[in-house]
Image: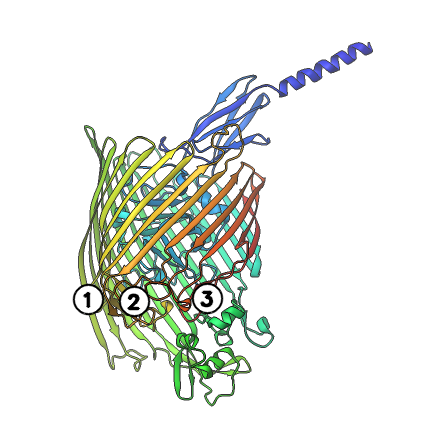
Amino acid sequence: MKLNKITIILTTIVISIGCFSQNSSIEGNIKQIDSINVLSGISVYLDKTNFGTVTKGNGSYFIENIPIGNYTLIVSGIGHFTIKKEILVEENKILVENFILKETIASLPEVTITGGRVGIKSIPGSVHYISPKELQKFGYTDINRTLNTVPGVNIQEEDGFGLFPSIGLRGTGVERNTKITVMEDGVLMAPAPYTAPAAYYFPTMGRLQGIEIIKGSSQIQYGPYTTGGAINLISTQIPNEFSGKISVFGGSFGTKNLHAVIGNSHKNFSYMIETFQSSSDGFKELDGVGGRGFDADIGFNKQDYLAKFSVHTDEEAIIQQSLTFKIGSAIGDINETYLGLTQEDFNDNPIRRYAGSQVDNIKTSQNQFSLGHNIRFSEQFNITTTAYRTTFARNWYKLDRVRSNGTTRKISKILDKPIDYSDVYAIVTGANTDTAFDEALLVKANNRTYYSQGLQTKLKFNFKTENFKHKVELGLRIHEDQIDRFQWFDEYAMDNTVMQLTNAGIHGTESNRVETANAIATYLHYKLKIGKFTTTSGVRYENITQKRIDYGNADPNRIGLDISKRENTVTVFIPGIGFDYRFNKFVSIFAGIHKGFAPPGSKDELEPEESINYELGTRYSKNGLSGQAVLFFNDYTNLLGADLEASGGDGTNEQFNGGAVQTKGLEFNVTYDLLFYKEESPFNLPLTLVYTYTNATFLNSFDSSFGGWGEVLAGDEFPYLANHQFTVNLSLEHHKFNLNLSGNYRDEMRTAPGQGEINFDEKTDAYFVIDMSANYNLHKNLSFFANTTNLTNQQYIVARRPAGLRPNMPRAFNIGLKARF
């Protein structure tokens, strides 16, 4: 009897072990919705088990040693709709399951995914896309750090948090993004794109779902700035089912971030509601009684709200239509300053902040509205129309100049020569409060309001004739924008390192003027594909009228005591053509030539910025290895400069002709999955290298009358443009977690035009900064996140403008949780 019991027990154990050691597996391939582009890094797992993996560089996945039974197979990837499928795993069988995923983002037409994540398409021109997955790796809220993965992007840091980005593309100059087209969901997003494109407002990085960077000949569709390129920031999309997420982060310098989204789609109605809120105590140390202890805030608080509501026809309707209303509001209270440090003070303590900046603050308020209509008559023909309006108000209240002994000095001049101007320098630092002038510190209220509004529509039509494929796109935009400057000075005394208001200025007695632009733009874009050869050609037309009414400093009520007016009209055609040839499905080459343009201001003697731009590149994608290399050359007949205070000038905002300039460079990026051939490994190990070389040279001599440039000589190199930039990213990806490492190198930059060896007091520092991040899925609906920026705590000069030296952000840590439902 006992022997029979033992036999039964052993038999049961053997059978059980056999059941769990069956060589059953699941394999397959994951592709994009178009059934061409494979997807890597997509999580494939069995719900409520530990069986799972991520797709390889060729889109394949393999899960082995699965016990027989019924399971729910889940396929999910950030930026794609999740697929769930009930499956049966049978004994000693290989189950093949292939899937096609649909992106959650309704992006601009065709894009090249940064790092080759989704492969390549026949785009005659350099176009990059930073996907939701890439954005979430490091969880950056700083657009400057995010764009490090894109070649050809030029950046100048300012505040350490990315609150006021200065971005250029292909050497256009970085001054407050004034030479690139910035959009959100295809709509112009600068406060006043034609009259005042300087980006004192930039869409909140933390709420974006994707970013498109368009360079080369394809950018003429987007305008009005067509030399370097365009950046389209993609907001959170409406989900296809009820879902939401809440992310909470906290870290160094009292930084706190909250991101919450909820949305749903019904048969004929869908919606999405979102908020992103961010605050920090700041990382600088303000001079004063008790150091940082007295009542002055150096941090910031930003709140952003966005909602989308859409109504649409039934899915089976012959003619598909949708109407989407988008509304957003963003407010900011930021205690940032233009006042930097002298070289000596920077060397002693780079994060010091002078007492003279204690009341510096910018308050911002931005509102956006858009109503978009899309009608799809067939697979070949659709029309999209959008009416839009944005408003923006800001008052940057900041120390501008200092008065002593009857002489007034700009803060930039004081910090350039602190020994020569020791009396006013002592007032700025709070070291000298014994002055006969109670109104020593002149704080300027840079109070401005903006609006931008218009109607844009585009018609897309594609058809075939024998072996030819045709795609025609026709666009029209009617636009108006305005900036209203209504500024004044308040005067303060320094009393024991604390600033006291002694004379409140009359509003409108500094700058008191209104500038308005009216523009009609249209373009025609034609794409022809013949076998392996693709060509795109197009032309853009811009008709721009800019007007300025200056009421003068003695007419704050604007009753017309001493009005001066001026007006300038520009009409321009902007052609472009590009070519792409695919040798096979792995390798292609492309080339393009187009006209670059930037609108002039309201002065009739100003010429528009014009250039002829060339590029030649190649793409490769095979076996986990993908990349792109591009040579570019921009030949300016006239470069426009602008007297911006943010760029070290006097802040008149007047433009001037800068003459001929040539810009050339190389862009290179490559990605390879180091575990590509380890098909049974549950890990991916993608390595990405990004390199940019840029050189821009003035071809003629002139006196710019702009403090940031001064006298320019032929052969001088462009300021604030790094010759060499390099980024390396390495990620370890698993369906349960990922670890990410990023290193970014930026060459030293000239801070003024010049040639030959750079003077020590006319350059920024070269640097190499390392960032790290980790994501771990605690549950299918809950994950833990942590990141470190500037891991080795490097300290360097990022700029010598607007006034004095500015530091980078020291090492910072952040941790948080992400919940989804």
650 or 614: nearer the viewer: 614
Specify whether 817 is left or right of 803. right
Front label number (2 vs 3): 3
Q: Secondary structure at mark 2?
A: strand
Which of the two labelled residues, at mark 1 and mark 2, occupies the earlier sequence position?
Answer: 1
Image location of residue 648, percent across then percent down = 37, 70
Q: Quadrant of the N terminus?
A: top right
Which of the two labelled residues, at mark 2 and mark 3, occupies the earlier sequence position?
Answer: 2
Residue at the spot of label 2 = 642
Q: CA distance from mark 1 to mark 3?
A: 37 Å
Which residue is located at x 46 percent, y 68 percent? 336
Specify whether 694 is left or right of 306. left
Which residue is located at x 53 percent, y 81 percent? 431
Up-down relation of residue 433 to residue 677 (above or below)? below
Q: CB atoms at circles 1 and 3 under 8 Å apart?
A: no
Which residue is located at x 55 percent, y 55 percent? 792
Residue at the spot of label 3 = 806
The disc placed on residue 418 is none
The disc placed on residue 568 is 1
Which amino acid, mark 2?
A: Ala
Local crowd size for mark 1, using a 10 Å CA cut-off: few (<14), some (14–19), many (≥20): some
Which amino acid, mark 1?
A: Asn
Local crowd size for mark 2, using a 10 Å CA cut-off: few (<14), some (14–19), many (≥20): many
Image location of residue 259, percent across then percent down = 50, 52
Q: Secondary structure at mark 3?
A: strand
Front label number (1 vs 3): 3
Local crowd size for mark 3, using a 10 Å CA cut-off: few (<14), some (14–19), many (≥20): many
Farthest residue to the right: give it: 2
Image location of residue 810, percent across then percent down = 53, 60
